[in-house]
Amino acid sequence: MFTLACKDLGTPECGYIAKEDDSEKAVHTMLRHAQETHADKLEELSRKMNEKEIFELMLSKVRKEP
Ligand SMILES: [Zn+2]
C-alpha cells in the first residue's frame, strides 16, 4: 500500500490521505483531490513548477506502508 498525505504537501489543515496499491496512482489520486479541494494552492504551485516537477514532488512524499 502506498500513501500520500495531503498535509505533507503544504496543507496542514487537511486530513486527506490518498491510498493506492501503486505510488504513481497515489499521486494521480492526490492530484484529483488537489484539483477539487485546493485548486488555488495547485494554481499557485503551477506558477512555480511544471506538471512533471509537481508530479515528482508528490511522488517524493509517497510513503510505502506494509
Ligand atoms: Zn487536501
Image (cartoon, helix red, strand yellow):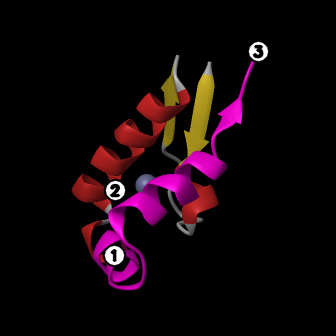
Going from N to C along the chain, the mark reached first, 1 or 3, is: 1
Numbered badge on residue 60: none
Residue at (45% x, 54% y) in the render: 55
The image shows residue 43 at horizontal and vertical percentages of 28, 76
Residue placed most toward the observer, 19 or 50: 50
Going from N to C along the chain, the mark reached first, 3 or 2, is: 2
Residue at (70% x, 36% y) in the render: 63
Q: What is the C-alpha distance between the residues marked 1 and 3?
A: 32 Å
Q: What is the C-alpha distance between the residues marked 3 and 2?
A: 25 Å
For numbered disc 3, what is the local secondary structure? loop
Q: Quadrant of the C terminus?
A: top right
Span shown in magenta: 42-66
Q: Amino acid at mark 3?
A: Pro
In the image, 30: left or right of 36?
right
Residue identified by numbered label 2: 34
Residue identified by numbered label 1: 46
